């Protein structure tokens, strides 16, 4: 999996939009960009995945510029329950059983 | 929907004892992963199995072993426990070839405390 860099922490208030940017300068042609969310003492949870341009689901949006050297996870109108650690992972499809390699995630703190 | 089941949820052991953690993947999932997360640390991959065969191996100590059984459940066996083994142990499962790459479903974890 390619190396990624993301902010250690971010603070926000309820109702605001939060954008977390991840840098992955060495991303390869076949690599996907995947984001996970982890609450304290719980297992990580898959949020969203994309390859290029924009992907949106019921939880978040993922913006990927044309050069794919970075990506931005966008959380619309955050609430207190969005306080968690967010991990950006980059890698190709791999074979069955390929591990997730978690780097340093971004701790998002949402206040009222 | 059914989720990944892990047992026990909490386990307290003494140094040099052994422990066995169990994982029951989501029905029809054929791939199981084990991760270790120490206090304040990021999850670290230990080992994975696909169709009952070891698929990928990470930083799993030689004191640990794991296997996946015919019903696809998996067990992580830990021997000669050390204080540093105290951590949350997560099991995850996925269905090969289905869904987005790298979409794994994590269980609630087993909190192991070594005294």
Image (cartoon, coloured by chain):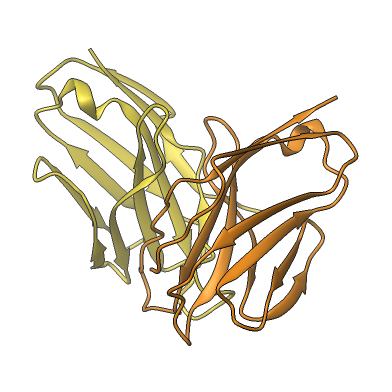
> How many marks can you see?
0
> What is the residue that sits farthest to the bottom in this orientation?
A29
Where does residue B27 sit, x and y in percent of width and height? 52, 61
**Quadrant of the image containing the N terminus of chain B:** bottom right
Locate the C terminus of chain B and report the quarter of the image it occupies.
Answer: top left
Relative to A4, say whether A110 is above or below.
above
Residue A48 locus on image (x, y percent): 66, 64
Q: Is residue A22 left or right of residue A100?
A: right
Left or right placement of residue B105 versus residue A101 in this view? right
Identify the residue at image location x=83%, y=36%.
A79
Question: Which residue corresponds to the image point at 55% horizontal and 73% vertical from the top-left?
Answer: A69
Most extreme residue toward the top is B115
Q: Nearer the viewer, residue B27 or B63?
A: B63
Picture coordinates of residue A83, whole percent (x, y) = 69, 34
**Residue B97 higher or lower than B64, as above or below:** below
Q: Is residue B2 left or right of residue A90?
A: right
Q: Which quarter of the figure has residue B86?
A: top left
Give the chain letter for orange: A
**In the rendered view, does B115 fall on the left or right side of B34?**
left
From the top left corner, tell me how far across and down residue A55 is, in percent: 74, 73
Question: At 84% from the left edge and 48% from the top edge, which residue is drawn?
Answer: A17
Q: Residue at x 38, y 68 (%)?
A: A1
- Foreground pick, A91 / B16: A91
Q: State which quadrant residue B58 falls in.
A: bottom left
Rendered view: B5 above or below A33: above
Q: Is residue A97 above or below residue A95?
A: above
> Drawn colour of chain B?
yellow
Quarter where residue B20 is shown = top left
């Amino acid at each position: 999996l390619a190396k990624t860099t993301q902010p250690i922490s971010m603070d926000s208030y309820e109702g605001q939009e939060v954008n977390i940017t991840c840098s992955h300068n060495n991303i390869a042609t076949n690599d996907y960009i995947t984001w996970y969310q982890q609450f304290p003492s719980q297992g990580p949870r898959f949020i969203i995945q994309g390859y290029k341009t924009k992907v949106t689901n019921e939880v978040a949006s993922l913006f990927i510029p044309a050069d794919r050297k970075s990506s931005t996870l966008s959380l619309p109108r955050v609430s207190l329950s969005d306080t968690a650690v967010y991990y950006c992972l980059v890698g190709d499809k791999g074979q069955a059983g390929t591990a997730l390699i978690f780097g340093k995630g971004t701790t998002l703190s949402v206040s009222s | 929907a059914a989720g990944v089941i892990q047992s026990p949820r909490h386990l307290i052991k003494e140094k040099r004892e052994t422990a066995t953690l169990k994982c029951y993947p989501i029905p029809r999932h054929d791939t199981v992963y084990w991760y270790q997360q120490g206090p304040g640390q990021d999850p670290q991959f230990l080992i994975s199995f696909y169709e009952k065969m070891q698929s990928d191996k990470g930083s799993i100590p030689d004191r640990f072993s794991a296997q996946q059984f015919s019903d696809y459940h998996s067990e992580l066996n830990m021997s000669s426990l050390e204080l540093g083994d105290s951590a949350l142990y997560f099991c995850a499962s996925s269905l090969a070839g289905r869904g987005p790459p790298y979409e794994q479903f994590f269980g609630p974890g087993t909190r192991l405390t070594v005294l």
